Every structure is written in structure tokens, then in C-alpha cells.
Image: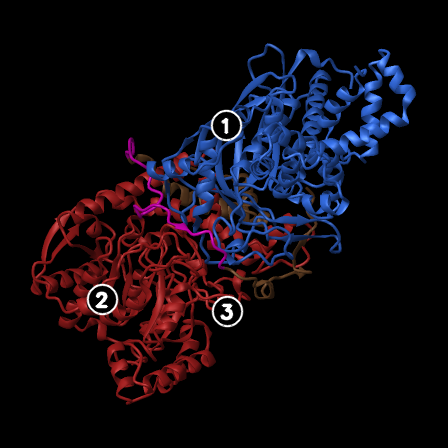
Chain colours: A blue, B red, C brown
């Protein structure tokens, strides 16, 4: 790709479909759990059988409202469901129940921070409630497509951003922030592989300085942050090349292929441009009273930014540490539980969680929810550092044993005899031994080779199998090594 | 037995003068004897009926059961009936055996009623003559060359001919009242939201309402009592108490204020029909009702309004019939598009296709405001007309139809002429108010109906007025020759 | 308002109805006569009139978030035209 991207500017808007974490579907009492056998979680309403009717799940509404409040948006006091029509085999009724003219959430915003530290605000045009479609399985079945409608009727909010985004990197920053938010709110599990959080990217390009937007394309099926970046970059390059070659961009829906990193026009969406929206006559207007909205506002959990500020203020953590620890709500909760259980300094806890725990999880390929060491257990270990039962160094050994599933900290310390030696006469006895065994080094130190102090520390620690309290060793060694008299 | 009222039948069952099995068998025999000429049933369910009758007899023998226990009825084929074909009069659903019961089917079963079978109807309830049924036209028992009206033509013909004591029906633009008028029955379309729509195959969701076709207001009151009420499975079902309809029947009419809208007596009304309706007005006046003129100035716009709103909703409601999960599927379709187009092209009849196309057109890009939105606005004007009228009167009265039953095939290829059949009935659906048609005389040997329209949830008063009228007249007792 | 056979074809496509070419003219005439009847609406004065989507002046009722439906795949697929391994089958879809 040899085009000069410097003269071009990309204009990007994202549409994020976020599955809400309800137990039952948005308009039926069928379960929403992922991974069931095909069509075993599709009831008569989800299948669009004749004569059946939708009734709105109150929890889906509550979750949509809580999202709106979290992005500082307006909650519509009155909104309606509309039918969006198109024929597709994973859309059982021939229409999707969605919202069109009057969405539940309008005019929100999300502040993002880019990798270079600069900040930006992305507007959220709207977020509306709708039902998910089923899935088409294209493999096998003698050249036919199989339809699984388990997902049909799962509640979604579609979050539509303003075309405020100017690069793939900004798009990813926005998506990560949004992802963090909906998971924090407890309204979405954020699982991108399972499709709980999906993104369509509207991309257009224009020459810098131009006021009008170019013709946009909509790229679907980008189900990881990395793919979003690749798909947008590809699409920007493709559009610039088309225009520079004298061509025109066609407004169309495109599909991202993760294997090739390319996008291509979707055939099945060729004429899906007249959706014939009208208010769904099976559903009545949704009215959110001020009291109802206030109740939801009061029940909102602490959001990432507030939590980060609190971690800095209350625990004295650096902005970086606080940012890492509040990145995901389960990690923040884990950290707070460790602090509480250990009684140790928050800074020590933060170091352990960030360095040791996340390092171990990374090796295991697990997330915080799957940690083999519970917050209580890690707190127990750090408590032993705090009360000087073990040194920080020994603690690493204990932690490894805990990760390996050998039990809790106290049991491992006991079983391995790792209790720290703080008894001063015992340490002095070891120091005496070491001094006797190394007369040359002793002479050297006393003649001014200060560097040899480290050698003696090492020898004492070695002789005590690492169990001697390092502070005591340092202090006592200084006394003993000093020239007599 | 087939000329007794539901109340008399219930008394007969309780007094052990006959059993529900005998009563049911009697009606099944009549269906076997007469229905070849009428075609009022799509499916007859003798085994299910006899099992229900036996259960009813057991209940009655134990001294239990209510006013409907053991009484047979016909269900319009628009209501889903578990384990029984529910075709909605369409080839599309000719092999559709519903896996669940409509709420009203559950309720009438629970009330002890015995389902004789599924009544014929215009395809997807789209029609005013019952000629659009894939299962063939229904004949009017009063004259087999005439239509019984539609879309509940099978329900009407079956009850009028004494093949069933009563039948369920649905009314989107007159589909209960117009057949009632054309076959000498009492038919009531309740307030929108009074009877659950769950399991009733949707035609136009904001207009559809289930009701009853019966041989008297009293019979209708008993059946409607068992059908009405809140259903949590229907978001448009209204959660307010149901009046005691049978208990309200005996109230005298003194002081009742009835409005006569000029628009219902304007050009187009057959003079023979008008004189029957005027006779009913006179009789009600004699019974103590007071009359005054009211105006429903937007009523003439109800047909054009309806033919935007109803097809728009229908085009959407019928999008689910795609040959994928149930219903007719075209053979050997090479592509998905071909599967859709051929399944729908083969499964739907011409009238249904016309309405789907009209509805698709009025909702499509560039036409929505001019048609759909405009119709919704005019709908409010029509609603406001009624609100204004009910500020001064209790009921509004007019003819149900402009004329008596027409000949089969008479309006075959002129959809607009067919649509104008519903000129007097559509406004009530647009406004959502209850309306009733009852017999008020004959013109050219064919029945004439008069229509009462009431305020929201005023079914009890309408049934009361109809019952009082029927205590003083005997039009409703006339039976078609050959079916006495 | 007159609909041309070409417009009928477009609408029929949008509604996924197969109309034989020789029927297009007939449908065009019928649909045009319906639209002409409907065009009476244009004369109504509706400035400042709130559109009426529904006869009920009620708001949407909310359902508790509870699973109330059990698996009835066998019943539902007994009436399906083509199924395999629990999936509904359709001609190959090209995305």
C-alpha cells in the first residue's frame, strides 16, 4: 500500500451490539445461556410461531437505563419499539423488534485516553434496545445452511457512536473503554468470542480540511479488538486507493475476514436497505418515570474512573497501579479483598497483585475469575510478610506453591519449615560461623572493601536457607563486621 | 336441542335431561348432515369433542361445572389449538398443527366447553365474504347462493344453521359483526384489549379482537364472560375487572341515551336495510331509550384509513411465514430467495398477497409519511369523533352493513367494492371501542343487522340493550329454512 | 396514485412474493385502485394531530426476568419442513 495517507482523514463511527446479562430473553421466558444444543432455548415466541406475542423483560430495560446513566446520556421518558423488516433465515419473524425514532438512550459521551496519553471525548448518539437474531451455520448439511435460533431474542443494546473517531487506534481505545464500562455495570459479560460484545465499523475517508463526510461502508463481524484495528486500517487504505485511482466508494455492508485481514462486500445485504420501520403494535410505549430512573442511578456500581481516583487517594497508589487494578472490575474487587484480608500495606498488595498474581495468571492463560489463588489466600500470604513470619523472598516461594495448589500460605510455610528467623542470638550464631569460615574476606572488608558487605549478607542468608530476617541480618552484620575496638 | 339457548342447554344438562355426550353427538351429526352444503368447518374434531363431553358429563355428575360446562362450540380456525390443525384458512398453514393453545382456547376449555371443530374463514381473516379461504367459500344458510359474510363466515354459518350453539370469531374491520348481520346472529367485538390475542394468528395487531357469534345476546354474554380477562402473555391485554355480563342483561333501558350518526345513514345504504334499522330504533324507543343525533364527521375516512393501517400491520405480521420453521415450503428451491418467494407466492392467496403488497408499499421508503403516518393521524380524528359522541350518549347505533348478503362471486375481482362492505364496521376497530350487531329484520328474505357501538369496556351495557331488544322482538329466533 | 407493473415487481420483491410476469399488470391495476381509494386521506386536515399507533392509552407492562419456558424443540420441529441435528435447514446462504 503506497498511498499517501497524510493527506487523508478517516471518519469512523462504531455500532456496538452488547448482549445484556439477563436470565431470560427480552420478549420471552426462554433462557439466554450460551452454548446449549441448537434450538433447545428457542421458545414459541423466539421462533416467531403464529399468534404468539412479546412481553418486555423488565431487567433488560433496567440494564439499558443504567448504561445510559453511566455515559451521562438522556433517558427517554417515553420510548417505543419498532419493527425492522428484512428476510433472513436467522430472523424468525421477518422483522427484528428494535427501536427507531425514539430510543431509550440518547446523547451520551465517553472519555477515552489514547496510548500517547492524550484524551478525547467520543459522543454516543444513541443506544437502543433490540432483540438478537439467531445464527446461520454454513458448514456441511449437504450444501445447505443450518439455522440455530437459540440466540434469537437475546436482549441487546446497540450503542451508536458519533462519527468522532479518526483512527483505528482511537476506535480500539473507545471500544476498550466501552467494554470496560458495560462489564463494570454488570450488564454484559463482555465475551467477544461468544459474541456478547460485537462491533460494526462505519468508515469513510475524506481529504484533510474537507468539511463533508465521504461515502461510508459498514464492516461487520469484527469480534476482537485486534480485528477492529485491522479491519478499519484495511478499509481506510482500500477506500483511499479506490478514490485515488479515480473510483467511487459504494455505500455497502462489508464483511471482515480474519484469515486474510480483508473486507469484502456482503451479498446477502445487497437490498436490505428498506427496513420499513413502524411502531410495533404488539408492544406499548415504555415510560420511565423520574423516580424509576433515580432508583437505577442510586444502584449504579462505582464506575472505573471513580474507582481509580479512590484507589489513588485511599490507598496511595500510583496512577499507573490504580489504572491497572481498576481495569477490570473483578481485578479491582480482588485487590480490595486482598488488602482487607492481609492487613498489609496497600502498596505491597498492589505490587503482589500486579506483578506476581497477574504474571502467574498470564502464564496459566487464565483471567482473574479463574485464579488458582483466591484473594483470601493471597491476603493470608501477604499477612505473613506483614507480620514478619516470612520474608518477601520466601513469600515468592510460598506463592509458587500456592499457585501449584499445595495449600494455603500457613500450611506451606509450616510444611516447608519456612518461618523466618528473627531470633537475634540465632542470627548472631550464623554470622559468627560465616566470619570464621571466611577470614580473608573479613580482613578485606575491615581494610575498607565495603563492597564485601553484600558477600556476607549472601553467605548468612545462604547458611540460614533464606529464612533469616533480612533487616536483622543487615543490622547485626554491620555491628559484627565493624573492626573490633 | 340445536334450537335451545345456552342457558336452556345448561339447565338441561344439569337436570340430566340429556348428557353433554348426547348434545355433542347431536351437533356432530348435524355437521355431518349439513356441512357438505355449507362448508362452515375446516376441521371437525369428533374424538376431542367426545372426550371433552365425557369429562364435562363427569363434572356435571359430580354436581360441579359452570354455565358453559358441556356446551359445544366451534372455534374459528384462527385460534391455535394444540394438536389440531390451525390453518387460518390458508394453504400456507394447511399442515400446521399448533403446538400450543390460544389463551381463549385454554379459557373456554377450562370453562368446560366442548370444541366441535375449527370453523372456516377468509384466508388470514382478510375478506368480507369468506370467499378467500383456501378451503373454499362458505355458503349462507339463508340462501346457499349468498355469502355468509367474512372473515368469520364459517363461525357464522355454523351457528346460524344450528351446527354449533355458538362460535368464537375475530373482528379486525367487521369480521364478527358483518357475518352476524348477514346470517341473523348476534355478534360482539369487545373493546380492544378485553380478550387476549395470545395464540390468535395476527392479521392487524392494533385492530384484531376476538369475540363471539351466537344466536342471542344472552348466549353471547355467557361465552364472552369465559373469554374475557387479563392475560400476562399479551402486552396489549388490559388488566381491569371483567363485568358480569349475564347479570347485567336484565337492566331496563329507561334513560338510555343512544346517538344516531348521520354518517351511518347517508348515501349507499339500501332502503330496505334502512327501514329495518329504523324499526329497531322505534322498538328501542318504546323500551325507554332516548335518541339524539350525533356526528362522526371523519367516519367516511375509516375505510381508507383502515386500508393503510391493516395492510401495513399485516405485511409485517405475515413476514414470518417463510417456509423455514413451519408452514408451506416450496419444493426444490435453489436459493434462499427462491425459497421465500415461491413458498409465499404458493402459500398465500391473491387477496392476502394484495394486502401484503399494499402494506409493504405504504411502509416503504418515501411513502411512509404520506400513507402510514397520515392514516395514523386520521385514525386519531376518528377516535376523537367517538370520544366526543360518548360525552353525550351511552351508545351509538347504525346499520351493520349497507345491504343484505350478496351473491357468491359478485364482488370477485373488485377489491375496493369488497372493502366498502365494511364501511360501517371499521371505525370501531380503529377507535378500539366495543361494537355489537344483532338481527333487526329481513329484506328480500335475507337478514338485516343493526349495530351498537359502545364506550370502552361497555360490553355489559351493549349486551344488556341487545338482550332487552331480543326480549321484545323475535327476529333473532328465526332460523334459516331447512336448518330448523 | 398509479402503480406501474415495474413498481409492483419491486414491492413484490421486497415482500418476497413470487408474482408471475403475466400477473403484474393485473396486480398493478388492482393495487392502483386501492391506492386511489386510500388517497382520500390526503384531503384530511391533520396538522398538529398526534399519530395514533394504538387504541389503548396504556404503557408497556414489564415481565420479571425469569426463565419460564422449557425446551420443546421436538414439538416445534415436528412441524418444520426441513431439520437436521436440531437445526432448521435452508438453501445455502451466501453472506
Q: Which of A241 and B243 lies nearest the eye of the viewer? A: B243
Question: For residue C53: magenta?
Answer: yes
Q: What kind of element bears circle 2?
A: helix
What number is the disc on residue B245?
Answer: 2
Residue A455 as seen in the image, left or right of residue A407: right
Labels 2 and 1 in the same subunit: no
First in sequence, mark 2 or 3: give its number: 3
Report the Cα–Cα distance between label 2 and label 3: 32 Å
Name the residue carrying label 3: B85
Provide residue B181's location: percent of width, then percent of height: 27, 64
The answer for how far apart the CA atoms under marks 3 and 1 are is 60 Å
* Outermost bottom residue: B17
- Provide residue A469's location: percent of width, then percent of height: 72, 31
One can see residue A419 in this view = yes
Instruction: Point out which mark residue A86 bears.
Output: none
Rendered location of residue B131, percent (x, y): 42, 62
Quarter of image, res B400: bottom left
Per the rendered image, the range of residues in magenta is C45-68
Residue A306, which numbered label? Answer: 1
Q: Does residue A359 appear left or right of residue B400 in this picture?
A: right
Q: From the viewer's side, name the closer residue of B441 and B56.
A: B56
Can residue B296 be seen here? The reply is: no
| Vertical placement of residue A263 versus B18, above or below | above
Local packing at callout 1 (Cα closer than 10 Å; few below 14, some 14-19, many 20+) is: few
Question: Is A55 colored magenta in this rendering?
Answer: no
Q: State whether discs 2 and 3 lie on one chain.
A: yes
Amino acid at each position: 500500500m503506497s498511498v499517501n495517507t497524510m493527506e487523508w482523514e478517516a471518519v469512523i463511527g462504531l455500532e456496538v451490539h452488547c448482549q445484556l446479562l439477563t436470565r431470560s430473553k427480552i420478549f420471552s421466558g426462554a433462557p439466554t445461556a450460551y452454548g446449549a444444543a441448537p434450538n433447545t432455548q428457542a421458545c414459541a415466541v423466539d421462533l416467531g410461531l403464529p399468534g404468539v406475542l412479546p412481553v418486555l423483560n423488565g431487567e433488560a430495560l433496567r440494564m439499558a437505563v443504567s448504561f445510559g446513566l453511566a455515559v451521562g446520556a438522556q433517558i427517554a421518558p417515553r420510548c417505543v419499539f419498532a419493527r425492522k423488516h428484512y428476510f433472513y433465515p436467522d430472523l424468525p419473524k421477518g422483522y427484528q423488534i428494535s427501536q427507531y425514532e425514539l430510543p431509550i438512550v440518547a446523547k451520551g459521551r465517553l472519555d477515552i485516553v489514547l496510548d500517547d496519553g492524550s484524551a478525547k471525548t467520543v459522543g454516543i448518539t444513541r443506544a437502543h434496545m433490540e432483540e438478537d437474531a439467531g445464527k446461520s451455520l454454513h458448514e456441511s448439511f449437504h450444501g445447505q445452511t443450518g439455522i440455530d435460533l437459540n440466540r434469537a431474542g437475546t436482549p441487546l443494546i446497540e450503542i451508536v457512536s458519533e462519527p468522532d473517531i479518526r483512527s483505528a487506534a482511537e476506535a480500539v481505545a473507545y471500544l476498550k473503554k466501552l467494554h470496560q464500562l458495560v462489564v463494570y455495570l454488570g450488564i454484559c459479560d463482555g465475551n467477544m468470542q461468544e459474541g456478547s460484545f460485537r462491533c460494526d465499523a462505519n468508515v469513510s475517508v475524506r481529504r484533510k480540511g474537507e468539511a463533508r463526510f465521504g461515502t461510508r461502508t459498514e464492516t461487520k463481524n469484527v469480534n476482537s479488538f485486534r480485528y477492529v484495528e485491522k479491519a478499519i486500517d484495511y478499509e481506510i487504505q482500500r477506500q483511499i486507493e479506490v478514490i485515488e485511482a479515480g473510483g467511487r466508494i459504494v455505500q455497502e455492508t462489508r464483511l471482515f475476514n480474519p484469515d486474510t485481514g480483508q473486507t469484502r462486500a456482503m451479498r446477502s445485504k445487497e437490498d436490505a436497505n428498506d427496513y420499513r420501520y413502524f411502531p410495533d403494535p404488539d408492544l406499548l410505549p415504555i415510560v420511565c418515570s423520574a423516580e424509576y430512573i433515580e432508583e437505577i442511578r442510586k444502584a449504579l456500581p462505582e464506575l472505573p474512573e471513580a474507582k481509580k481516583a479512590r484507589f489513588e487517594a485511599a490507598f496511595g497508589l500510583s496512577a499507573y497501579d490504580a489504572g491497572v487494578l481498576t481495569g477490570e472490575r473483578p481485578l479491582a474487587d480482588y485487590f480490595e479483598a486482598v488488602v482487607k484480608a492481609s492487613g498489609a500495606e496497600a502498596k505491597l498488595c498492589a505490587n503482589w497483585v500486579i506483578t506476581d498474581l497477574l504474571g502467574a495468571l498470564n502464564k496459566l492463560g487464565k483471567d482473574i475469575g479463574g485464579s488458582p489463588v483466591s484473594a483470601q489466600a493471597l491476603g493470608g500470604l501477604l499477612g505473613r510478610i506483614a507480620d514478619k513470619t516470612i520474608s518477601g523472598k520466601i513469600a515468592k516461594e510460598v506463592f509458587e506453591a500456592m499457585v501449584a495448589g499445595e495449600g494455603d500460605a500457613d500450611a506451606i510455610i509450616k510444611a516447608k519449615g519456612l518461618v523466618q528467623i528473627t531470633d537475634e542470638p540465632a542470627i548472631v550464631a550464623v554470622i559468627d560461623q560465616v566470619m570464621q569460615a571466611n577470614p580473608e574476606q573479613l580482613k578485606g572488608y575491615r581494610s575498607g572493601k565495603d563492597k564485601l558487605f553484600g558477600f556476607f549478607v549472601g553467605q548468612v542468608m545462604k547458611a540460614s536457607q533464606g529464612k533469616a530476617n533480612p533487616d536483622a541480618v543487615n543490622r547485626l552484620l554491620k555491628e559484627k563486621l565493624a573492626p573490633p575496638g | 336441542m340445536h334450537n335451545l339457548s345456552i342457558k336452556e342447554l345448561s339447565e338441561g344438562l344439569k337436570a340430566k335431561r340429556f348428557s353433554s355426550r348426547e348434545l355433542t353427538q347431536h351437533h356432530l351429526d348435524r355437521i355431518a348432515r349439513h356441512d357438505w352444503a355449507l362448508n362452515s368447518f375446516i376441521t371437525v374434531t369428533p374424538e376431542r369433542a367426545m372426550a371433552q363431553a365425557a369429562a364435562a358429563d363427569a363434572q356435571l355428575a359430580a354436581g360441579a361445572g359452570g354455565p358453559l360446562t358441556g356446551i359445544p362450540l366451534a372455534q374459528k380456525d384462527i385460534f391455535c389449538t394444540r394438536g389440531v390443525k390451525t390453518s387460518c384458512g390458508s394453504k400456507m398453514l394447511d399442515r400446521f398443527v399448533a403446538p400450543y393453545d390460544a389463551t381463549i382456547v385454554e379459557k373456554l376449555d377450562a370453562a368446560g366447553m366442548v370444541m366441535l371443530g375449527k370453523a372456516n374463514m377468509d384466508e388470514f381473516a382478510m375478506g368480507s365474504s369468506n370467499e378467500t379461504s383456501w378451503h373454499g367459500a362458505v355458503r349462507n344458510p339463508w340462501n346457499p347462493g349468498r355469502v355468509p359474510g367474512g372473515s368469520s363466515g364459517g363461525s357464522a354459518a355454523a351457528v346460524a344453521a344450528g351446527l354449533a350453539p355458538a362460535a368464537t370469531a375475530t373482528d379486525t374491520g367487521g369480521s364478527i359483526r358483518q357475518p352476524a348481520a348477514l346470517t341473523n346472529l348476534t355478534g360482539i367485538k369487545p373493546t380492544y384489549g378485553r380478550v387476549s390475542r395470545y395464540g390468535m394468528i395476527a392479521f392487524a395487531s392494533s385492530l384484531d379482537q376476538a369475540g363471539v357469534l351466537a344466536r342471542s345476546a344472552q348466549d353471547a354474554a355467557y361465552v364472552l364472560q369465559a373469554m374475557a380477562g387479563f392475560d400476562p402473555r399479551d402486552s396489549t391485554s388490559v388488566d381491569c375487572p371483567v363485568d358480569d355480563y349475564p347479570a347485567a342483561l336484565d337492566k331496563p333501558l329507561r334513560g338510555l341515551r343512544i346517538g344516531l350518526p348521520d354518517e351511518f345513514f347517508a348515501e349507499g345504504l339500501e332502503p330496505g336495510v334502512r327501514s329495518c334499522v329504523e324499526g329497531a330504533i322505534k322498538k328501542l324507543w318504546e323500551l325507554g331509550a332516548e335518541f339524539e343525533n350525533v356526528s362522526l364527521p371523519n367516519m367516511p375516512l375509516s375505510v381508507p384509513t383502515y386500508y393503510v393501517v391493516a395492510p401495513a400491520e399485516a405485511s409485517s405480521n405475515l413476514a414470518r411465514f417463510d417456509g423455514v420453521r413451519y408452514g408451506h415450503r416450496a419444493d426444490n428451491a435453489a436459493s434462499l430467495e427462491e425459497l421465500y418467494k415461491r413458498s409465499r407466492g404458493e402459500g398465500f392467496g391473491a387477496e392476502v398477497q394484495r394486502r401484503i403488497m399494499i402494506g409493504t408499499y405504504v411502509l416503504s421508503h418515501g411513502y411512509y409519511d404520506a400513507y402510514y403516518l397520515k392514516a395514523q393521524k386520521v385514525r386519531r380524528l376518528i377516535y376523537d369523533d367517538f370520544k366526543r359522541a360518548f360525552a353525550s350518549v351511552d351508545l351509538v347505533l347504525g346499520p351493520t352493513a349497507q345491504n343484505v348478503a350478496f351473491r357468491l362471486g359478485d364482488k370477485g375481482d373488485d377489491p375496493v367494492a369488497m372493502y366498502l362492505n365494511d364501511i360501517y364496521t371499521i371505525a370501531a376497530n380503529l377507535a378500539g371501542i366495543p361494537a355489537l350487531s344483532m338481527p333487526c329484520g329481513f329484506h328480500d328474505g335475507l337478514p338485516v343487522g343493526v349495530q351498537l357501538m359502545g364506550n370502552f369496556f361497555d360490553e355489559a351495557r351493549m349486551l344488556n340493550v341487545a338482550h332487552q331488544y331480543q326480549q321484545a322482538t323475535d327476529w333473532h329466533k328465526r332460523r334459516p329454512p331447512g336448518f330448523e | 396514485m398509479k402503480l406501474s407493473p415495474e413498481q409492483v415487481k419491486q414491492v413484490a420483491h421486497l415482500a418476497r412474493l413470487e408474482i408471475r410476469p403475466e400477473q403484474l399488470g393485473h396486480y398493478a391495476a388492482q393495487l392502483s385502485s386501492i391506492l386511489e381509494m386510500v388517497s382520500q386521506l390526503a384531503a384530511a386536515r391533520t396538522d398538529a394531530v398526534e399519530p395514533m399507533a394504538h387504541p389503548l392509552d396504556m404503557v408497556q407492562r414489564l415481565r420479571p426476568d425469569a426463565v419460564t419456558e422449557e425446551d420443546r424443540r421436538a414439538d416445534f420441529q415436528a412441524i418444520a419442513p426441513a431439520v437436521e441435528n436440531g437445526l432448521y435447514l435452508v438453501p445455502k446462504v451466501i453472506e
